[in-house]
Amino acid sequence: MPKRPSAPPASPAGSRTTRSGWLSGEPLSRRTHLVLGLALPMLLTLVNTVRLSGFTIDDAFISFRYADNLARGAGLVYNLGERVEGYTNFLWTVLLSIGALLGARPEITAKVLGTLAACASLVPVYLLAERLRPMRWAPCLATWLCASSFPFTGYAVFGLETPLFVLLVLSATELFFREHEREEGLPWSGLLFALATLTRPEAPLLLLLLYIWQGGSPLHRKSLVRVLLFAAPVLVHLAFRRFYYGAFVPNTLAAKTGNFTQQLAGGSDYLKRYVAHAGPLLWLGIGAIAIAIVRRRRDGIAIGAIAFTWGLYVVLVGGDWMPFFRFLAPAEPFAFVLVDVAARAILERRERAAVLAVSAFAAIMVIHRARSWNEAKKFIFEKEKVFWDDVPGRTAEWIVKHDKPGPVVIADIGYVGYRTGLPIVDMLGLLSPEIAKLPGGYTNKTGEGFMDAVFAKDPRYFVIISSTADCKSPGPPSSRAALADGRLQSGFRLAETIRIGTGGAWCIFEKKDAPK
């Protein structure tokens, strides 16, 4: 039997690699790579998403209400008659509305679509990893890292657009690289990036990074066609947004920004906590970037630039309030591809010390990731789910049973707004341009004009968050501003106290009825 090269290509799909042959350096067959590196991680992704499917994040109910209203013919609005773009996931919301038209509840549609998107995302992850380093002796690791990631699997079923966005940007990136290598065919990656932009507004940043680092003339015919395929749907959507909502950007942009110092501090802490959560395996990605630079692999440098730039973007915008790093879920697969490349590069040298070191490190990481994932699941179901099912749930039920329709002033608008169906006055400004434009950062736009904007909606209810059960110690800035306003004190009465198990309460103030 002739001696095989040290790094041969993978065996044909129909051939088999024996255990002894593999130990002696033979590559795994194509079929084995697909089973170990794609099919089994896909199965793990499915299992993990099912295990987490019982929880829905509160913000998802905002999109659910928009989708329901659209399906019922009321328009793409939250409050009937008020055209405010209080969402940032147009395509996702439209897909949910199609499901509603077919009789499916948005909660179910979101979880089914999210699970399918997460599983499908492993295909471009596998292809990107294979592109940077062909599959030979060691199977793909990036897909396993995705399948064992809590942000990747959790936010697949928590109700938001994250899994669809991840699928679209990964598929568009992988397709962009393939298009760069051939002359024939339309550059459909432009259309995929357009769909990603309609899902979340950050997608153009990734397309720009690919153009910067992949090289080639932007005036080349294929590049111009790609830009056209990208720009046409995006410009149509911008025209719709301007006509329908009266603005070129979502109202949420103004509501969630306004204090750069606050954003920078919050974003830096957000990224720091994610690095601690992910563990030291991320540092292997630096090795892959170094390999790409030395070998002048523009595709590897581009993937590294995407992962790094996305992290920087998250720092600049301040992260978000949701648990377990939703904002970093789109960057994770790109980072995991880099980790995969570095790890397989070491393993496939087949030097005993290197293989033992990587194997020991991998064993530690498996234990770390399994423990981290299970701890996150425990936190979600024992704390987050218990709170959101209990406190907003009881608040919504009281308002529904009270049966006195009228606008509800509240900060956490998701489930309460979806369950009651009543007009909502959002104290954080997502649904209120008058509040969103006020000075201050997110949750802190409570200065001059804040309460005037709230009372202009003629509310019937105020939901105030208090750190004590007597409703006299408001916590968030919006609750403090409301409770300090004389109009609340004179015109409303404390109607119900929804106590929180750990202390504090959601306090429902109702407008005093006019004397008969």
Image (cartoon, rainbow, N blue to C red):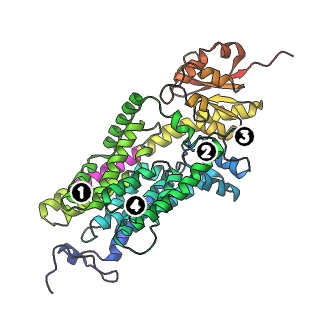
Q: Amino acid at mark 4?
A: Thr
The residue that mark 4 highlights is 173
Is the residue 221 above or below the residue 444 in the image? below
In terms of sequence position, does the residue under pointer 1 or pointer 2 come before the other? 2
Which residue is the extreme one toward the bottom? 1
In-image side of 383 versus 515 (left or right): left
Q: Quadrant of the N terminus?
A: bottom left
For image coordinates 32% across by 60% down, the residue present is 214
The residue that mark 1 highlights is 288
The residue that mark 3 highlights is 80
Secondary structure found at label 3: loop
Disc 1 versus disc 4: nearer the observer: 4
Q: Amino acid at mark 2?
A: Arg
Q: Which residues are magenta?
A: 360-375
Q: Quadrant of the C terminus?
A: top right
Category of crowding for the residue at label 1, using alpha-carbon neighbours closer than 10 angstroms: few (below 14), some (14–19), many (at least 20): many
Q: CA distance from mark 1 to mark 2?
A: 43 Å
Instruction: Check if mark 3's residue and mark 4's residue have beta carbons within 8 Å.
Output: no
Q: CA distance from mark 3 to mark 4?
A: 39 Å
Q: Amino acid at mark 1?
A: Ala
In terms of sequence position, does the residue under pointer 3 or pointer 2 come before the other? 3
In-image side of 20 versus 470 (left or right): left
